[in-house]
Image (cartoon, rainbow, N blue to C red):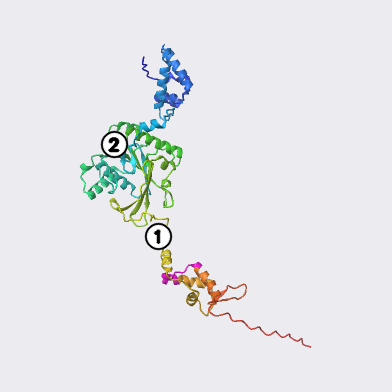
Amino acid sequence: MSIQLKFNPEDVQGFFTISAEDARNPNATFDRTINLLSQAERKACARDIADRMGMPGTATEIENKLRERAREVPGVCLPSFIDVPTLMQNHPELKPTVIPNFLREGETANIVGGPKSRKSWLAIDLAMHLAMGLPWFNRFHLEKSRVLYLDNELHPETSANRFKRIMERRELQSRDLSELCIQNFRGQQTDILRLESYFDEIRDDGFKLIILDALYRFIPPEIDENSNSQMTAVYNAIDRYASSLNCAFLLVHHSTKGNQAGKSITDVGAGAGSQSRAADTHIVIREHVEPDAVVLQLVTRSFAPTEPLGLRWNYPLWHYDSSLDVTKIKQPNSKPKKAENAAEKAEEFEWTCEAFASEFLSETPKTKNEIHSAAKDYRKKHPEKYLSGRQVDSLIKAAVKAVCAHAHTHGANREREYATVPQLKIADKPPKRKRMRAA
């Protein structure tokens, strides 16, 4: 006989102390109680319920129902392991692809860039290509899919203007984007945990990609972005939504301030490191040395490694540029270094002791500081014959050793000087005569 039970908090109150906070929410009270009951307590609870029902023989079935209910409670982990052959038989294929080489159903991806790095434009462009089933950057062939763009940074007017600009440039009609939906949350007190009921409502709408722009505004107020455990909980919630909706999530996130060139891909991104580890794909936008150009780098969990992409910005679109050298990422404070360019040219000119002495020394002695100053002025006029400060010191020593220059000394309290002629020796002065005392 099958037992139809509608469990209530009172059914288990005798086996667990319920907090005042839980008591205000009966459903949460029951789930929390079932979650924390031990196996022995669950058995005793089942016997008690069966006895009160006058059906003591059904205790085992009631215990199984309690166990099944506990499995449904988020955060509960009960043994349900299987052997590897069964695992392989149950899952012979990977999950369906949403974006080739990037993302699958049920997966989460981060797209990270600096402030005002046009990462939202990139996300919008991807959403439009997926909604229309067009190749992205003529490299990634996308299957037409429904896309939901949840934006909590822009006003609806700004979002509409961006879509309009892109559509005009691509010569699209509004009907071409019928599979792309958007909702603006700016100014609303909405966070990722409060969106659970929202996602339950759209379960049958068939979205294959949901974009959250930007992540930092979807983080609940009580969550610390720098806490690994708390941000892991946020990503666990997103994973739960992705699994329930059979779709992928793309999170637009910001990097820390300053140049990111010295960091590995998974280290780029503000907040706790768990954000890159929890995601299945981590995409990073790095500045290129050329203006209005970036390098798109990514690491994935379920795809083979993907080569970096060079992208060039031409408002309002990003374009793939195969001519960009993706290894030339902009370094901190990187400017065209004249010294390096000059040093490369200087490799063609080799300074000798004779040439150095002829250019910077004369019969008039000079201190080392005066020689360095002259060499500095010379560098500005003749970059093709570059001389570093270290080279100047080395050439002075070499010139003295080769007798192309001569050191002049003037006692311990004066700086040594250098000239093209030897130092003159001062003849010894005659001894002073002793004065004779008057008689």
315 on left or right of 288: left
Say whether residue 381 is magenta: yes
Residue at disc 2, secondary structure: strand
Label 2 Cα neighbours within 10 Å, binned few <14 / some 14-19 / many ≥20: some
Q: Position of residue 192 (x, y in %)?
A: 37, 36
Say whether residue 197 is magenta: no
Quadrant of image for the C terminus: bottom right
Whether residue 195 is visible, yes or no, is: no
Residue that numbered label 2 is attached to: 207
Q: Residue lying farthest right?
A: 439
Q: Residue at x 41, y 68 (%)?
A: 345
Q: How many marks?
A: 2
Q: Position of residue 5 (x, y in %)?
A: 37, 18
Label 1 Cα neighbours within 10 Å, binned few <14 / some 14-19 / many ≥20: few
Q: Residue at x 32, y 33 (%)?
A: 245
Quadrant of image for the N terminus: top left
Which secondary structure is most common in the magenta stretch? helix
Q: Amino acid at mark 1?
A: Lys
Residue at disc 1, secondary structure: loop
Residue that numbered label 1 is attached to: 335
Q: Quadrant of residue 210?
A: top left
